[in-house]
Amino acid sequence: MFDYETLKFLWWCIIGFLLIGFAITDGMDMGVGGLLPFVAKKDIERRVVINTVGAHWDGNQVWFITAGASLFAAWPLVYATAFSGFYFAMMLTLFSLFLRPLAFDYRSKIESSNWRNNWDKALFVGSMVPPLVFGVALGNLLQGVPFSFDSLMRVTYTGSFFSLFTPFTLLAGVTSVAMVLMHGSTWLVMRTDADIAKRSAHIGRIVAIVLTLTFALAGVMVWQSIDGYQVTSVINTMGQAQPTTKEVSIVTGAWFNNYKAAPLLCLAPLSGLIMPLIVALLFSKKVKSTGIKVMAFAASSIAIIGIILTLGISMFPFVLPSSSQPDHSLLMWDTVSSEGTLSLMLMVVSLFIPIIIGYTLWCYKKMWRTVTIAEIEQNKHSAY
Amino acid sequence: MISEALVELSRWQFAVTALFHFLFVPLTIGLTWILFIMEAVYVMTDREIYRDMTKFWGKLFGINFAIGVATGLTMEFEFGTNWSYYAHYVGDVFGPPLAIEGLMAFFLESTFVGMFFLGWDRLSKKQHLMGTFLMALGTNFSALWILIANGWMQNPIGSEFNYETMRMEIVSFSEIIFNPVAQVKFIHTVAAGYVAGSMFVLSISSYYLLKGRDVAFAKRSFSVAAAFGLASILSVILLGDESGYEVGEVQKVKLAAIEAEYHTESAPAAFTLIGMPDDEAMETHYAVKIPYALGIIATRSLDEEVIGLRDLQKAHEPRIRNGMIAYEYLVKLRNGEDTPENIAKFNEIKHDLGYGLLLKRYTDNVVDATEEQIQMAVKDSTPPVAPIFWAFRVMVAAGFTMLLLFALAFYFNAKRQIEQKRWLLKAIFFALPLPWIAIETGWFVAEFGRQPWAISEILPTFLSTSSLAANDVLFSLIAFIIVYSILFVIDMYLMIKFARLGPSALHTGRYHAEQVPEQSAGLRHSTS
């Protein structure tokens, strides 16, 4: 159907699409979980906040699971290298991810303030640690990660957990947290009213500005002080997955090469910079009309798309550069599964993604309403 | 060299996390259909009590489901974090079923689980029922794809090794889907899940009947569970795993280990009911045997042999020696000596490469392995027998006990005498752990019985690990044990609390605890 080269490129797009899907849907839940202690003071308010995502968090989380499994299927070496290399960071993420499903489901089962407060804390940790770690991890991708392969393709990672944290990667972590918090706030403004909506807009404005600043600062750092990577040998884009047979050199500022080659691509970082400012602007006055609310959510979603695309485009064709053995860096050309597998999985994805989006939207539509304190009081035994 | 400690700890961590996850999954698989049946009756008859049944058992389902989702994340991570060489070596084949599971099944299940809990007032009756159906369907599809992946580990067909990429790659995906081992496993495993769901409802309903509480509610729940459970346990036993033991080397080894059959017996083989397997002497002491039974069960015939472990090991030895040569050529090919002759020679013997890799446990330089190392690898080529032998017997004993209980429950329920049979209700109540005992021992037989392979005859477990320090894994293993223990306590606390409360947990005002205020005062917190 497609040749190997096209398939490889399409899979770069699909992985990006799944990550964007994850950030927009589950990132929203994580933002809501992170905002919980700040926008909702009383128990009933917290239940309002939780019930805006109550029916959807589980489906949303599957974007993450599917992105992970697709990485396994389409880029097995990336999955193997990143997950084992970032061992403790991954374990930290995993253990904090345990907290959300339990907190959502268990919190309101027992009417004790102690019980509920503890689950609220769990929800906060489970919502904020993963985006922080993902941000730090993506910052590390930009910096390069110390790994290499032996002749039988066994990967060895030579960094440590603490070496993951540098000023730049922490900045990336903060950017990621600000991004999900902004997104969560636009969701809460759409789906709640009164005090909760007001507080959400207020915090949303602040984190949106923080996001623009950190994203811009990260860009400056990538320009000035972060090593970029460049393939210096000819890439056989039709070739088999043999990531140790090319030559790569480290050049500061190389992550800007793609924008120089195709200036139109600058739209991605520009939306990452401007869209949060639009959110901040929309939230600077009292938000009343539905149109404004939806616009803020859309702006936030476009910001997310822009930020994730910025990362992908800057690094293209790199996926996981190696700082210790640059020639072993993983490219989207040479880290992929076989042609047959990519082709098969492309068909599966093209068949199921539209179906998934269809029934997901149907569910959102059915559950769509402004969640109010009165509603939760009426349904206090069945709501989350 | 990979350290033994790293391999052992990685295996322990995987076993602990998978077995723990597998406490919750079967109940989810079974309860979704039971919920669907109850809700379907509600929609057809419009009788409130069936809606209450759906909602109440749904509450218990939710407690279980949340922890199943949480612990399922671990499985997704661990192939990459702890088994990264495995992830690379077979990701091309093993990754797709997992990704398809996400796309086809898990999205469906997880999206509609939200509708199940929170959509009662926002969907029409039929829409809600359809949602419950899709949730159940998603759950079962999920099991299908996971078992297709697992079936391939047991019987890796439809794929081939590629020396250039140094991994297994898909040749025929339809072969992988229609792998007979995967198909049999799927039926066996989901039916075991239905048994778990049925036993859960049956046991807790028995408790209400024994207490004389909410009798109408409990009897209806009991009926659904008895019928569904009897059908399910019959499928588990009749369509048991046995038929899957004919194909694939690892399955043959497993069968011999299950039967502690060290010597090949002439057909039809006797079934060893009980005995003392001894791996050193390769004999089973004090064996009590039933003539002909094994041959008939395992081969469905009177004239086919069941091969014993001694002969299986004997057959592995030349394959290990052949594997050493395959390894030698692989190294040549990887070093750029990819002449057509070398490629042809390698292709001729690459099916034994996995056996050569067994030697990696003893020497990095497989080509120069000593005679002693070869003999050790031969000894390694089948798993320890006693744990498999006993685990299998525990599973079967639990299975037949449940068959008896479901049959009696169904019979007396049909005769409308179940309330009088207090001994049976008590027995059923105390039998609650049986499905889990059977399921966990069954998992153990299937996966421990696969050793020393991660992928049968292709990739030894030993070689599949990540390049981590043993202490890293020790640390995470301890963390898992602590955190999972806490999760287990929380889960049990909520389960027991809500199970004791019964349908009163719905706060409809129609059930036991709400009508007798003195008794509900015993509950420490009020619940929602």
Image: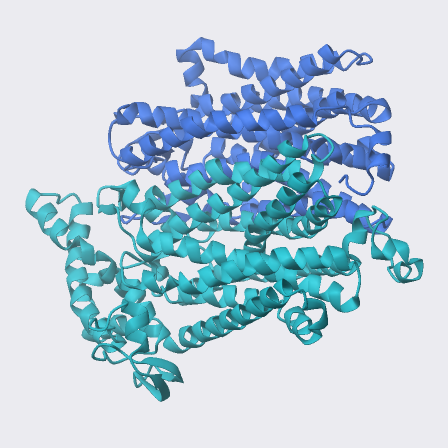
Chain colours: A blue, B cyan
* Residue drawn at x 26%, y 70% as measured from the top left: B377
Residue B370: in sight, yes or no?
A: yes
- The one nearer the camera, B215 or B502, is B215
Seen in the picture, residue B171 relative to B419 is either above or below; the reply is above
Q: Nearer the viewer, residue B156 or A263?
A: B156
The N terminus of chain B appears in which quarter of the rendering?
bottom left
Percent coordinates x, y for residue A129 in the rendering: 65, 41
Q: Residue furthest left?
A: B341
Identify which residue is drawn at 50% across, 72% down. B400
User: Residue at the right extreme?
Assistant: B518
Please tell me which residue lies in front, B419 or A166: B419
Looking at the image, is B490 positioned above or below residue A97? Answer: below
Taking the image as shown, residue B78 lies to the left or right of residue A290, namely: left
Q: Residue B217: give x, y in percent of width and height.
A: 74, 55
Give percent across and percent down for residue B308. 25, 76
* A158 in relation to A335, above or below: below
Q: Residue at x 69, y 24 (%)?
A: A182
Give the side of residue B504 with respect to residue B18, left or right. Answer: right
Query: What residue occupies the far bottom of the structure in this picture?
Result: B286
In the depicted structure, whether residue B358 falls above or below residue A2? below
Q: Whole-percent x and y of residue A367?
A: 69, 28
Pick the front one: A16 or B30: B30
**Is residue B1 something that shows in the picture?**
no
Which residue is at the far front?
B415
Side of B204 where B433 appears, left or right: left
Tag count: 0
